Image: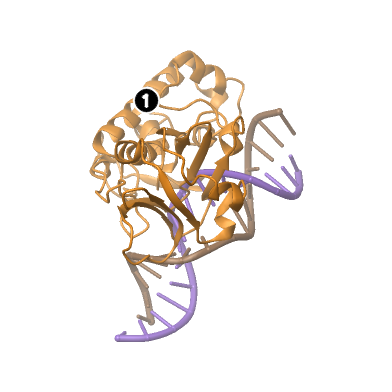
Chain colours: A orange, B brown, C purple
DNA sequence: AGGTTGACCTGGACGC
DNA sequence: TGCGTCCAGGTCAACC
């Protein structure tokens, strides 16, 4: 599932390939996939150049001067780069062709929590609801934004308005590294242990970005902008390892539900 | 206002 | 082989 490291990997790939490229046409193939902005405004990207490509939370953000095109990846979003003219596969909802014949195709099979937002200058759309990016948040900011909460720590980590970019995989991984039980209420965790969690979040995200993200099996799984798989998958210590032995203590990993999400943890290492 | 829950959607895994 | 069923989860709306 694309979380911050996967979105970062995609954004870097697109930045390298597309910065400076001029749009020759934009085709929205599924009208309800455009969540912010109009079809007419989208057409007016024609002739504009990509000035940069970045990321905010789990979103890939393409800049066209002061206009921005936000790709909300959701569960299964895959921006694919290729040459124009090849047959268009299923679930291809947006096609942007660039001068010179390169083409960006936004493919998304499960259209859960996914879409495209065209933001006019000053408009923030879904980006306005996000807390600070989890990969750059300071310890003081992290602890401060969690202070006073009563939700389970895992639910708080998944809440994008507290901090942006952490999803189910990396929340489980960070909580394991910090030795904190996912169900523990935020208010019952000392500032010192929250500091440890902050370091764990930053570390796990940095390692995953360095590895090019996580790929989870299936065609809906993540791949970089050029289709290469992420290599972090083999580094998961708890995510998807329910019933297996804890890599640290050997206890059998347990599975539970927190905030409606499948959660895996070690009953011995995480308190 | 913060916390919690369910709807959304489809492909893949699994069982018979 | 082929069908049915279940599961995954990011975001948002609606509720408490």
Q: Looking at the picture, how far across and down is residue A89, in whole percent?
A: 37, 65
- What residue appears at the point 44 percent right and 27 percent down from the top-left corner? A134
Side (left or right) of A250 relative to A184: left
In this orientation, which residue lies closer to the viewer: A15 or A266? Answer: A15
> In the rendered image, which quarter is residue B14 located in?
bottom left
> In the rendered image, which quarter is residue A83 located in?
bottom left
Name the residue tied to disc 1: A202
Q: Looking at the picture, how far across and down is residue A144, in whole percent?
A: 55, 17
| Residue A58 visible (yes or no) | no
Side (left or right) of B4 relative to A51: right
In this orientation, which residue lies closer to the viewer: A191 or A92? Answer: A92
| Residue A160 visible (yes or no) | yes
- What residue appears at the point 23 percent right and 43 percent down from the top-left corner? A231
Number of disc labels: 1
Side (left or right) of A6 relative to A70: left
Q: Can you say which quadrant of the picture contains the C terminus of chain A?
A: top left
Q: Helix or strand or loop: what does disc 1 sit on?
A: helix
Side (left or right) of A270 relative to A65: left
User: Is residue A240 depicted above or below A50 in this figure?
Assistant: below
In this orientation, which residue lies closer to the viewer: A140 or A22? Answer: A22
Q: Looking at the picture, how far across and down is residue A22, in whole percent?
A: 40, 42
Q: Residues within 10 Å of mark 1 (few under 14, many from 20)?
A: some
User: Is residue B6 depicted above or below A62 in this figure?
Assistant: below
User: Is residue A214 depicted above or below A138 in this figure?
Assistant: below
Q: Chain of mark 1?
A: A
């Amino acid at each position: 599932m694309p979380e911050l490291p996967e979105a970062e990997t995609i954004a870097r790939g697109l930045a390298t390939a597309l910065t400076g490229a001029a749009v020759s046409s934009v085709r929205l193939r599924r009208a309800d996939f455009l969540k912010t902005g109009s079809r007419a405004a989208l057409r007016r990207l024609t002739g504009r150049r990509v000035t940069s490509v970045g990321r905010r939370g789990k979103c890939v953000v393409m800049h066209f001067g002061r206009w921005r095109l936000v790709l909300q990846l959701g569960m299964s979003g895959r921006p694919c780069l290729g040459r124009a003219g090849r047959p268009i596969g299923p679930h291809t909802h947006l096609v942007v062709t660039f001068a010179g014949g390169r083409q960006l195709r936004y493919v998304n099979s499960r259209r859960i929590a996914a879409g495209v937002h065209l933001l006019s200058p000053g408009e923030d759309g879904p980006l306005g609801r996000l807390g600070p990016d989890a990969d750059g948040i300071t310890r003081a900011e992290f602890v401060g934004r969690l202070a006073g909460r009563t939700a389970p720590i895992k639910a708080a980590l998944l809440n994008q308005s507290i901090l942006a970019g952490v999803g189910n995989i990396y929340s489980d991984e960070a909580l394991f590294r910090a030795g904190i039980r996912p169900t523990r209420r935020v208010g019952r965790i000392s500032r010192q242990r929250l500091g440890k969690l902050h370091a764990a979040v930053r570390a796990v995200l940095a390692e995953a970005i360095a590895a090019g993200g996580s790929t989870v099996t299936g065609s809906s799984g993540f791949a970089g902008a050029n289709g290469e798989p992420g290599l972090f998958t083999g580094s998961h210590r708890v995510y998807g390892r329910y019933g297996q032995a804890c890599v640290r203590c050997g206890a059998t990993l347990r599975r539970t539900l927190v905030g409606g999400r499948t959660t895996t943890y070690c009953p011995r290492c995480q308190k």
